[in-house]
Amino acid sequence: MPPDSNLLDQRDANFGHPAPERWPDAEPILIAKMRKGQELKLRCYAKKRIAKEHAKWSPCSAVGFEYDPYNKLRHTTYWFETDPIEEWPISANGLEEAAPQEDEPFDYRAEPEKFYYNVETVGSLTPKEVVMEGIKGLISKLGHLNYALDTMGGGGGADVDMVGATQPAGGQVNGTLPYQYTAGSPNGVNGGMSNASPTAPAGNWGMSPT
């Protein structure tokens, strides 16, 4: 990730510290009780894996999302007793969209355009790091797919850096330059995440020329 968007420098000073150091009134986590004179002899192993293999390696404790807070698309059928408006209050995400008018016609061809995510982590990574690394991984997979489609049926190899960029052996693919992942500004809208998607030249979605 480029130095100008280094997320590690944006962490809190006490990030990752034990609970008593972050919250002095909190009780420490009890691992084992020992009597006077007792001791523990143990061997510890640290493994770096991903949540796809097991949930214990997930940095997230909860992830939720919402779209269409006013239910304009009518994808949700509300169960109510008297008044659905009073019994189903609009979430805070409704402030990001215009409220529907009473006489507004129903557009059955409309599709959701905005998705609101809430990410909660267990402390090993910040929510912003989880989202940015997820976007980077998605761009990497799309880059590999795009390159495979461009070179389908052709020869030659490619050097893959696994960061969202692929460097074709011939320098160009179908007359276009190789593509490269570029991260957004950390000071952009929604913490820079809205600027994280690179611009695209003709013929290469989601990629930018080097």
Image (cartoon, rainbow, N blue to C red):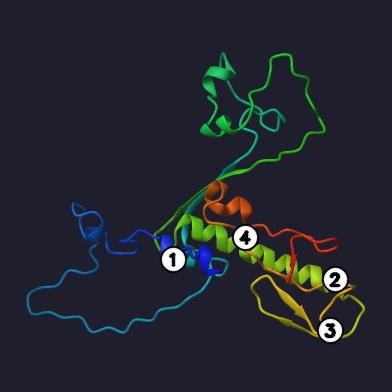
Most extreme residue toward the right, as rendered? Answer: 153
- Quadrant housing residue 9: bottom left
Query: Real-space Cα distance between discs 4 and 3?
Result: 28 Å
Q: Which residue is mark 4?
A: 135
Q: Earlier in the sequence, mark 2 or mark 1?
A: 1
Q: Secondary structure at mark 1?
A: helix
Q: Earlier in the sequence, mark 1 or mark 4?
A: 1
Q: Which residue is mark 2?
A: 176
Disc nearest the viewer among 2 and 1 = 2
| Image coordinates for residue 149, horizontal then vertical, percent | 85, 70
Query: Real-space Cα distance between discs 1 and 3?
Result: 36 Å
Disc nearest the viewer among 4 and 3 = 3
Q: Secondary structure at mark 2?
A: loop
Query: Real-space Cα distance between discs 4 and 2?
Result: 24 Å
Q: Amino acid at mark 2?
A: Thr
Task: Find residue 170 and name its label.
Answer: 3
Q: Residue at x 21, y 53 (%)?
A: 26
Q: Which residue is mark 1?
A: 8
Disc nearest the viewer among 1 and 4 = 1
Q: Residues within 10 Å of mark 2 (few under 14, many from 20)?
A: few
Query: Real-space Cα distance between discs 2 and 3?
Result: 11 Å
Check contact, mark 2 vs mark 1: CB within 8 A: no
Q: Secondary structure at mark 4?
A: helix
Check contact, mark 4 vs mark 2: CB within 8 A: no
Q: Closer to the camera, 121 or 164?
A: 164
Left or right position of 24 against 70: left
Q: Closer to the camera, 58 or 190?
A: 190
Position of 114 relative to 169 (above/below): above
Q: Amino acid at mark 3?
A: Gly
